[in-house]
Amino acid sequence: MARQPRLFIPDCPMVLELQGIAGQEVFKTREAFSLFHSQLPLSAVEETVAIHAYCMVPAGSLLMISASEASCAGRFVQNLNRHFSPAVRQVQAVHSSALWEPRFKSTVVQPGLHSLKACLFVEQLAARAAGAPDLATYPWSSFAAHAGVVNEAWLSDLPVYWQLGNTPFERQSRYRQFSEQGLGEHDSHGLSQCLQKGWLWSDDAFCAQIQELANRPVRPRPRGRPVKTIKSTI
């Protein structure tokens, strides 16, 4: 069976998961983290991609982006790999031919509150996978920028982030408050499942509304044959 194209919906952000091949660590040194971090804005500019959030842990990375075309996400990841892989092989003395799993995973996210939750989901990878006790001090995540600890001008804030307040201080303060509430198990599990399987993460109303704009089905079709309707002869 032919593989479905990667889901893409105009004006909807995407979450991408890049994993080290066979679960191996990609970032083994601070320099390796720094190389990837420095390459993110360069590849984004070259491939016309906006980066909303990111987090790197030894075994890989989560990225939240917006792209203008369906092919942009793939080109962006290829660009990252093309520049990062040769450089990191030198600093870590890596001799294997591949660093990453050959196909990255992705999900499309409904704009609005869903996208803000997805942003936090990306940044909380530092706690889930690296055991970071404080997201604000973790150096390889966009959380510190969203919380006002550091300035990363190349990040493109989500529209819903701008709605958190009229000033940078208000937005940063309210995002910190939002992060303290955390994500419920329902949201975390739902987003994780959509990411692994490539389906849209949204509410049902948005899903029904957006299907005609997508390049393929946004959620799995019900299993089994469609229920037959029997017409009345009366």
Image: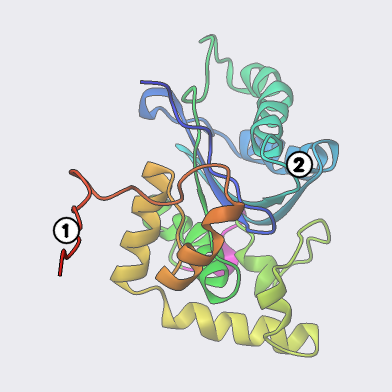
- Magenta region: 134-140
Q: How is the image coloured?
A: rainbow
Label 1 residue SS: loop
Residue 148 shows up from this direction? no
Label 2 residue SS: helix
- Residue at mark 2 to residue at mark 1: CA–CA distance: 62 Å
Disc ID at residue 79? none
x 69%, y 43%: residue: 37
From the viewer's perspective, tell me whether residue 109 is left or right of residue 73. Answer: left
- Crowd class of label 2 (few under 14; some 14 to 19; many from 20; radius 10 Å): few
From the image, state whether disc 2 or disc 1 is nearer to you: 1
Most foreground residue, 105 or 94: 105
Q: Is residue 149 above or below residue 87?
A: below
| Residue type indicated by callout 2 | Ser
The picture places residue 91, in percent across and down from the top left corner, at 65, 22
The picture places residue 43, in percent across and down from the top left corner, at 78, 37
Disc ID at residue 230? 1
Residue 125 shows up from this direction? yes
Most foreground residue, 169 or 222: 222
| Residue type indicated by callout 1 | Ile
The picture places residue 106, in percent across and down from the top left corner, at 50, 44
x 61%, y 53%: residue: 213
Most foreground residue, 158 or 19: 158
Residue marked by disc 2: 38
The picture places residue 8, in percent across and down from the top left corner, at 59, 46
Task: Please identify the quarter of the rendering in which residue 97 is found.
Answer: top right
Q: Is residue 203 above or below residue 72?
A: below
